[in-house]
Amino acid sequence: MTELIQHLSLGFSVALTLQNLMYCFIGCFLGTLIGVLPGIGPVATIAMLLPITFNLPPTPALIMLAGIYYGASYGGSTTAILVNLPGESSSVVTCIDGYQMGRQGRAGPALAIAALGSFFAGCVGTILIALFGPPLAELAFEFGAAEYFSMMVLGLVSAVVLAHGSLIKAVCMILVGLLLGIVGTDVNSGIARYSFGISELSDGIGFVSVAMGMFGFGEIIANLEQGEEREVNTSKVGSLMPTWTDLKMSFGPIVRGTALGTIFGILPGSHTVIASFSSYTLEKKLAKDPSRFGKGAIEGVAGPEAANNAAAQTSFIPLLTLGIPTGAVMALMVGAMTIQGIAPGPQVMTQKPDLFWGMIASMWVGNLMLVILNLPLISMWVQFLKIPYRVLFPGIILFCCIGAFSVNNSPAEVYLAALFGFFGYFSNKWGCEPGPLLLGFVLGPLMEENLRRAMLISRGDPSVFFTRPISCGMLVVALFLLLIIVLPQIRKKREEVVYESAD
Amino acid sequence: MALKIRSMKDFNAGLMFMGIGGLFAIGANQYPMGTAVRMGPAYFPSILGWGTVALGLFVFIESFIVEDTAPTRTAWRPLILVIGSVCAFAALINTGGLITATVVLIILSALGGHEFKWKEAVISATFLSITVWLIFDKALGLPFKLFPWS
């Protein structure tokens, strides 16, 4: 217990410096600003704002990134409630009842409950990370190359299994991501692979280009493909204060949502989406009058919002303790850490405790900021939403391009982003998820390295992955997950969970 | 026997994956393979590449069996204009300067939107040029060339 307090005080002493507070605020602000824009999810937001953090030292950079992530989640909920357009996939659920509340003139309380629910979940999440982080990291020190490889396999498989859409196409996307990650100079042999003699490629494809192209440009073009009619609830925001009944009714859902979100957050995959959908389903089943759902039931906002914020917090755990990203957002964080010169893994906690604990503390601070500062700023976000998309999107493209360029001060990254935009648009259209590709892309080089090392140590014996217990366990779970999904009953259930609430 | 494509999405996706996987797998041949113990640079990409080809083939075959909704119609105009504007930006930023690139990007990409209004585009381009100049040149001091004559 005293150790916990010690760690947290170290963390807060780092997080509460004026400089880091400022960066946290900037992150939350920018994240909300971009997250509010319809059609830009947290991944695209982070990808877009990532280059800003490159010039900062590691701790403020990561603090700002975390702030951007939470801000984007919060912005997405705001758009869902006001405009019925989910800013990100997990906001889809918030749209259902949140938008209805808005139409009834209760957008204010909806927004307030969403923020408070998220804050509660954030507090719980922070404590959990602080409690379980160190023991998990210690466990990770037992890991050898074989364990890391198997864990990455498990991570990739679960990411696919829990995601929506065609399983086999998602696996293909992972493989393509792994292949793209290999482009560049092979560390072992010094040979430049797939670089076609282009010097910019010999360093590998910048992941900013991939992220911006597939999540930024691809999404924008897909948006332009559709029509542009949106009824905006802006005139009816009114008072933000929820009634006492609202608070009472929301308490249970928030607690349950937090619990659900915490569990799903640790598992790899689209944690926030599954968390919010599950929470909605649960609340609907538990409610005394389920018919209220879909017409503005506040539990339908409180639960899912808490769930998705809890999932967002705890999804940092595998990254910060084991160094394994469990989703597209975390993949971007890994990329950011690598660019900052930090190798993600359990050693981060021991070698750079101020970075680790500072980041955890600032997550809590960020959550607090979002409640205190962003709620009053709602009217500003509302003004933003009034700008027609046709005026907004060129600006978004512009900032993406500048960001991509500034990575290496080279137009090559921008061209690559354009290429990935093209690829992303079509692959998405044909039912291939972009998230798994990004995850594979970030893990590719790591997986190869661990595979090589494991084989080297075992002198070419592939059974090493199964003879070592932890590694074997993880591969068995991965196989189990794959088999489960293939079974028809489970397949149907999975589609139900994912698609039911979307009507 | 006439084969009916039941899922255009899978058909296209399958071909795409087979193509990408094949390119990587064949491309790997120019590098040494090595052995399982000491993997050469071609080892991992070969496995992955051929794996992608195999799975892509599976998806391709599935497209004749499993029914799926048709993909939405390709929006060529926004696609070409957005991608084109990004490429134009890349081409112009070091030659014509940041401001030139910005203006071209805004106007070109706006043409890909639903209703293009010249007045809006020009105002937007001006406003964004000034914003970009303030943020990246004045505030952050990044070494951008601003105009063709800078």
Image: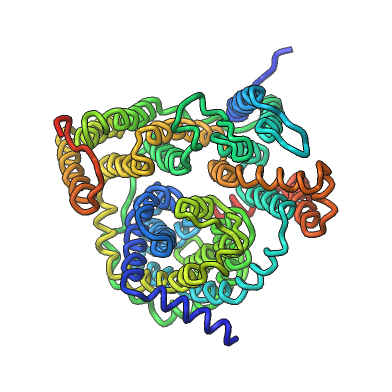
Asked whether residue A279 appears in the rendered view, the answer is no
- Colouring method of the image: rainbow
Task: Residue at 74%, 52% (x, y): give it.
Answer: A146
Counting from the top left corner in percent of width and height, residue A466 is at 83, 51
Would residue B25 be found to the left or right of residue A473 on screen? left
Name the image quarter holding residue A172: top right
Q: Nearest the camera: A6 or A238?
A: A6
Q: Nearest the camera: B66 or A267?
A: A267
Quadrant the N terminus of chain A occupies: bottom right
Q: Nearest the camera: A151 or A387?
A: A151
Q: Is residue A151 above or below residue A126?
A: above
Asked whether residue A343 appears in the rendered view, the answer is yes
Q: Count of labels shown?
A: 0
Counting from the top left corner in percent of width and height, residue A338 is at 50, 52
Name the image quarter holding residue B49: top right
Task: Residue at 67%, 23% (x, y): give it.
Answer: B29
Counting from the top left corner in percent of width and height, residue B55 is at 70, 32
Would residue B122 be found to the left or right of residue A231 on screen? left
Name the image quarter holding residue A125: bottom right
Would residue A364 be found to the left or right of residue B9 on screen? left
